[in-house]
Image (cartoon, grey):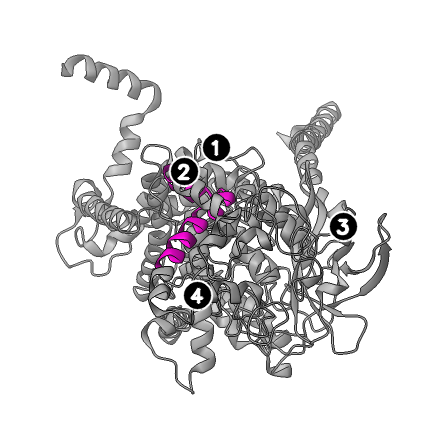
Amino acid sequence: MADSASPQDTDTAAADDRRRFFAVVTSILAGALATLTPLAAGVATFCSPLFRKHKHHQVRIALLSQVPDDGLPRYFPVSVDRQDAWNRYPRQRVGAVYLIRQSGVAEPIALTAKCPHAGCFIGYTPGGDGFKCPCHTSEFKLDGARVHGDAEVAPRDMDRLPVELRQISGADGASAIEVWVEYIDFQTGHREQIRTA
Amino acid sequence: MSGPLQNVIAWLDDRTGVRAIVHEALYERVPGGARWRYVWGSTLVVAFATQAITGVFLWMAYSPSTQTAWESVYYIHHEMAGGWLLRGIHHFMAHAMVVLLAIHLLQVVIDGAYRAPRELNFVLGLVLMLIVLGLSLTGYLLPWDQKGYWATKVSTELASQAPIAGPTLKNLAIGGTEYGHHTLTRFFALHAGVLPALLVLVLVLHVALFRRHGLHPRDPHHAPDAMFWPDQLLKDSVAALAVLAVVLALTIYYGGAELTAPADSANPYAAARPETYFLFLFQFLKWFPGELEVWGAIVIPTIALALLFLMPWIGRSRGGHLFNVALLFCLLGGAALLTAQALNDDYLAKWTDRTEENAAAYDASAAFLAAKREAAHEAERVIDLAQSPAKIPAAGALTLMHDDPYLQGPKLFVQHCASCHNYLDREHPDATANIVSAAPTAPNLFGVGSRKWLTGLLDPEQVATVHYFGYRGSPFVGDGENTDMVDFVQEAASYEDDEEMDADAKWQVQAAFEKIAAALSAEAQLPEQVEIDRRDQEMIAAGQALMEGGLAEVVSNGMSCTDCHSFGEMQDIGSPVLDGYMSRQWLMDFIRNPADERFYGEKNDRMPAFAPHDDRRLNQLDEKSLSLIVDWLRGDWYRPNNASTSD
């Protein structure tokens, strides 16, 4: 048919091709828009946690008088006002720290109970000479250093948290010293301390 | 009858071609005849169908949020008719599926059924395997109990160590930086929506390709060819029934799937382990110190998986095929060995004794077993509470645990009291509830305020023991500064000059002390003594009269309780007030400030004042912890009717 095509036929054929091209492009675009728009809305919502910033809290842990200067770890839960999606929980326990005060030293050190290996809860048996992680058997000395150094499963020593002492006094004239800790969450599995986003 | 039915089928077939579809589905040729070795693929399909059926019914009763997930699973398991069975089948069939997958994979590889033209179907099979493992992983968290929570926390923590995108992936998977509502909603959407839909899609392709290529016969001349229906289908059905029988047996044996205590981010679960079929990965990680962990957690598993996917192409040559078979045996064998090793590490203490060589391993295992026992104990308790008439509050089951003196009392006691006081049931020295240190510096508080405890306090033989006032460095005995009470009890019945009078007086004093113990104990109003307090009203009245002065006529030194203590009317004389002795209010006030003038005053030589200030920030103990300790010491906690937790 093509060899006997008149100019008019060629025009029609070209017009047909154009029409066909537009039909193809339009159907692909329209179809893609129709399906991708809801998908994009879904993905955006799904990704919303990425746009939220995680806050690190200053937390009151205990009174200094509750941490004797005997070099032994004392366990304290960490309670903060926590928001979980639509709920707000006042003073919810979100973790724990060990406070250790050496003899004659004013300020205790604070070690988070979260294992730097995979985030398990590091345990301490009162009177024991070290910390033990119950999951992959990492061991730490009382200052948080790994017992077996780099041969330990945990990639770094227990994470120390910044400690601040605050003097307070009550209406009845009594005063006390509070131990505050910046409760920072670190990523696990790395040699360095990297804060979670 | 068959006439109308035939008509309906004919009508349907005319509109849909259903006869041809059914025919094609059933009349598949099985070269070499039906064989038991071909059943594994079909059992997997039936296993998935089981999961879909039980899953949908579980879905109808499950509610994914941090205040309702554990609660709704508890309700399914313990309150709904047959719920434990439904959940048990879903749980154990998930285990069965992983085993069946391994068998199916092993058989396909050994038979070389992945060779051309079946390469893509092998790949689809592996994709199905990954989806099933994903379903297991996501399902484990949904009950939101301690076990699933802590195990999944570890696995998402590990995923976050993947290079570059790790932290972002973790953030997206758990819906934020911390576990919460959106962790559950996401895991549930994956578990009940996305993954099953994907699985069905890939399964349809898998079966379609399988039909396109036909069955890969192990030995086409084994027997005359047969048809799928009914020859092979018979064997498939029997095998599926056998799988179900095993799953049912496991469900009944274990009483359904385990539900540990509600997830608590602040209550570490030291026995957190992944589901059994992931234990090998867990164990594998112990081999990789420090930053090498990413190799154990991600790199090596990824390489192993990549090799699996390449098997059809590796296996084109005879040598390649042998390599594949050897690799798979190594992987499965290695996984089995690691699993055995993981179980041995954890349960070692059950079947060996502690020696010097195995001390560290033994202690770790003992700690694991203790944590497991403790978790089972907590789970049992919280289920008792959930079944109490008060039910679960809207804030969730976790508040049941946090507000329960029975569970929290011992923890707080260990934290605040146990460095001085013991809590030792002397009649059951091996009871797990005992909290004992070798050298206490204050009285044993087990049963404090009860008749038995007070009878011991007023017993000349016992008052100076370690359980009352005879602890290390006590000011009440020997050369102490405050020996009046112990001297009084010990000398009450001694008339040194007259042995006859002595014997008679002993009996009288004993009878008087018995009444005083009853009267004083009644002041405590212990929940456990309500009945005997009511029964012994006369004896208690007599005891009160003795305390208020009558005792002076009985004992040798002519003194009664009120010569030192205040009772009945307020006096200020530096010994504890006996009105309401060991009652809730009395004990709370005492712990707040034992140096208060109502208690020991200036004579308090050691006990800290835990909450003496109106300004709460200045106090060591908050009101709630204080009341939990006091309620626990006084045995004031909810007891279910069967009283299984009264130890």
Q: Residue furthest front?
A: B497
Question: Of label 2 and label 3, which has the lower sequence position?
Answer: 2
Residue at 72% from the left image edge and 24% from the top image edge: A12
**Alpha-carbon distance for marks 1 and 3?**
34 Å
Task: Specify whether residue B291 is painted magenta.
Answer: no
Q: At numbered mark 2, what does the secondary structure look like: helix, strand or loop?
A: helix
How far apart in space, not on screen, are marks 2 and 4 (Cα)? 26 Å
Please determine whether, in this image, residue B281 is positioned above or below residue B40.
below
Residue A114 spot, x, y in % from top left:
64, 63
Secondary structure of the residue carrying tag 4 is loop
Q: Are marks 2 and 4 in contact (CB under 8 Å)?
A: no
Q: Quadrant of residue B357?
A: bottom left
- In the displayed structure, does residue B26 sit left or right of residue B290? left
- Residue carrying label 2: B537
Give the labeled residue for mark 3.
Answer: B613
Residue at label 1? B390
Mark closer to the chain start, 1 or 2: 1
Residue type (three-letter) at the residue carrying disc 1 = Ala
Within 10 Å of the Cα at label 3, are there few (<14), some (14-19), or many (20+) other Cα atoms?
A: some
Give the alpha-carbon distance from disc 4 to disc 3, as whole Å.
Answer: 38 Å
Q: x%, y% of residue B517?
A: 44, 51
Dot 4 alpha-carbon crowd within 10 angstroms: few under 14, some 14 to 19, many 20 or more: some
Q: Earlier in the sequence, mark 4 or mark 3?
A: 4
Mark 4 vs mark 3, foreground winner is 4
Chain of the residue where label 3 is placed in the rendered structure:
B
> Residue under mark 1: which chain is it in?
B
Sequence-wise, the earlier of marks 1 and 3 is 1
Q: Which residues are magenta?
A: B507-536
According to the picture, the residue beneath numbered tag 4 turns out to be: B460
Whole-Å distance between the Cαs marked 2 and 3?
38 Å
